[in-house]
Amino acid sequence: MEKIQVNIPGKEYWVYVGGDAYATKLGQSISRLKPGKTILISHPGIMEIHGRRLLEILHQEIEENIIFLFPEGERHKNLEVLESGYRFLFNHQANRDDVVLAFGGGVVGDMAGFLAASFMRGIRYIQLPTTLMAMVDSSIGGKVGIDLPFAKNAVGSFYQPEVVLTEPSLLATLPPREIRSGMAEVAKYGFLYDLNLLKELQDLPHEFETETPVFTGIVTRCIEYKARVVSEDERDVIGKRAELNYGHTFGHALESATGYKLLRHGEAVAMGMMIAARISELASIAATDLVGLHRKVLLPLLEGVNIPEDISMEMVESALESDKKRGQKWNFILLESPQKVRMMSSLPKRVLAEAIAETIADVRMCVK
Amino acid sequence: MEKIQVNIPGKEYWVYVGGDAYATKLGQSISRLKPGKTILISHPGIMEIHGRRLLEILHQEIEENIIFLFPEGERHKNLEVLESGYRFLFNHQANRDDVVLAFGGGVVGDMAGFLAASFMRGIRYIQLPTTLMAMVDSSIGGKVGIDLPFAKNAVGSFYQPEVVLTEPSLLATLPPREIRSGMAEVAKYGFLYDLNLLKELQDLPHEFETETPVFTGIVTRCIEYKARVVSEDERDVIGKRAELNYGHTFGHALESATGYKLLRHGEAVAMGMMIAARISELASIAATDLVGLHRKVLLPLLEGVNIPEDISMEMVESALESDKKRGQKWNFILLESPQKVRMMSSLPKRVLAEAIAETIADVRMCVK
């Protein structure tokens, strides 16, 4: 088992990665935290597959465990589920002695984390990520929250977990498209910090074998990068954590323009990074063949993506514009070359439009 | 003007107290924070009386100021208003460059503070308290949040303001009963930390003159105690901040038993402290005539309180019990003598019952 520390002053915690993370560390963590009870927050799908093993471990440690389930999917990360979560916690007499377990992907982690952050002004919680995306990204760093209609993650807080337990072997039951989507975030760390990681990613077998040491090693390296960045810049104020949004501004615009249905988050981010690479070349800040590298790494991850004819460059641009109107400062995160980030606060509209149009056409043409 | 620092590591801020706090410090604070825009959160009643002056100061400093108003009263500190607040902030493109101004009493401060804490994972805010209760207590220390049905302050966070500006002269327009209610919190600091403060409180003229140096001095001293306590124990973990709940466990039970309508918060706390003093004597931990002192200070603050015949000791006890069932640990904060706190985790039921019954009878008999 690997362990990685997140070093936020006053809020240090460990991420344990490996096939025995739950068996070795869950009971231990709970007995260290001495909760009155544990509150498991998850969704029915994941409980059906992996719930039994988790509950067996819990029952050895703690007398009272209550379970709050809500349906899968980003559209349930909303105020209504939040309110029913509060009511559940209240009715079950949850309090600051208790511990929440967030068992699921990014949506579960965000919702459970924000419930924990805001119920009784904060109860402790543990992240138990079950998707690749959650393992390498959202379970670490304490960004928790919910969406408002038309505004992703508009409500939330920075609230760090007590510990994160990551078992890559859980991914064996995930659909391949879900894994590929998570791999886009892996690739992001590669472009930003680690060319070798990109190479390893490309060398993985087509149907990822998630229980190999190589795969666990890749997950661990991503966690190390994430832990390092959030340790330096927990609250996203010095521009370091912002780097992790590489591809995300465009990705969000693509998700929004396609109604959050067509693209998985990671797929949108993959296309967003391809757009960013094209911008680097069009704006002549790219020192190497960025587009070629991005296409080589990312196009395989987009397998199965189908951009319909009625999604146009204009829709993506208008989603970008509305992002800007909401006062989100546009900070385009670009690369000069891999591992060399360049922030740009504005870009010629023509460059944006061309990069978006070319990327959409490229994906339409080359992805099957 | 007085200034008091709240010294929470990494979150230091000043409380300015005096008749010129707004004129001198509001413009200055805003120009230091350089917000994109300011977002004034208040209720219609206070805006009618004091809004014009505030807006004049704001208009000198900032181009865009948006205003979110919600109705007065604890029952509006709920999820519905929170949600409409989020929608307001989103529709007005509020973002992390902006600054929220919480202009009102405890309800406005709690709601505006939690909106600020949770919208876009936290935007900065300034407390502008307009009631005595908010000035000496709730505007300092960052406890913000909302109520759930039947659970006061069940949702919220610890989120510190950038600065607190306190003008005791605003209280001149407050009904005397509101001032007396706030004076119960002043008395609380006296019992806990400062016998002289109790003497000064008793020497105040019957109809408080809120614009005198004596009155401002009293407010300032309370702020100093509150600032000291929250600086030592922001998150209520070492038992120090818990002391400030003196009288509150019983006070909340009284508020709950009377449907949150009959008693103002401070009145309930005053009666709660009288109950605590009786318990100290009944449990033989009181070294002095605590009941006599509490009656002398607090009975005058209860003027106008009318406990109806159908409120019984049993109702208060059952409210206390339901508090306990919710997993709130009972930590009875008692005094051995003024300035000498003694925490008790359990008490004989008979002692509790007797203290509650005697206090209710006492208030029924002696308050007109």
Image: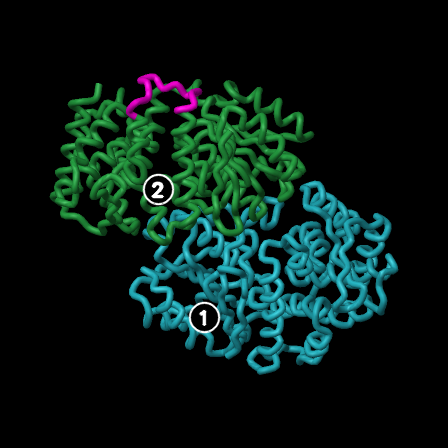
Chain colours: A cyan, B green
Residue that badge 1 annotates: A50
Q: Which mark is residue B151?
A: 2
Q: Residues within 10 Å of mark 1 (few under 14, many from 20)?
A: some
Q: Nearest the camera: B154 or B29?
A: B29
Q: Secondary structure at mark 2?
A: strand
Note whether residue B260 is visible: no
Looking at the rendering, the stretch of residues picked out in magenta corresponds to: B202-214
Q: Amino acid at mark 2?
A: Ala
Q: Nearest the camera: A62 or A149?
A: A62
Nearer the observer: mark 1 or 2; the answer is 2
Q: Position of residue A140 (x, y in %)?
A: 55, 63
Residue drawn at x 72%, y 71% as measured from the top left: A300
Magenta segment, prevailing SS (helix, strand or loop) = loop
A111 left or right of B349 in image: right
A322 left or right of A284 in image: left
Q: Position of residue A108 (x, y in %)?
A: 50, 58
Residue drawn at x 50%, y 69% as measured from the top left: A14
Q: Amino acid at mark 1?
A: His
Note whether residue A209 is visible: yes
Extreme-bottom residue of the structure? A213
Residue drawn at x 75%, y 48% as measured from the top left: A315
Q: Residues within 10 Å of mark 2 (few under 14, many from 20)?
A: some
A160 left or right of A284 in image: left
Q: Position of residue B195 (x, y in %)?
A: 28, 34
Give the letter of the chain under mark 2: B
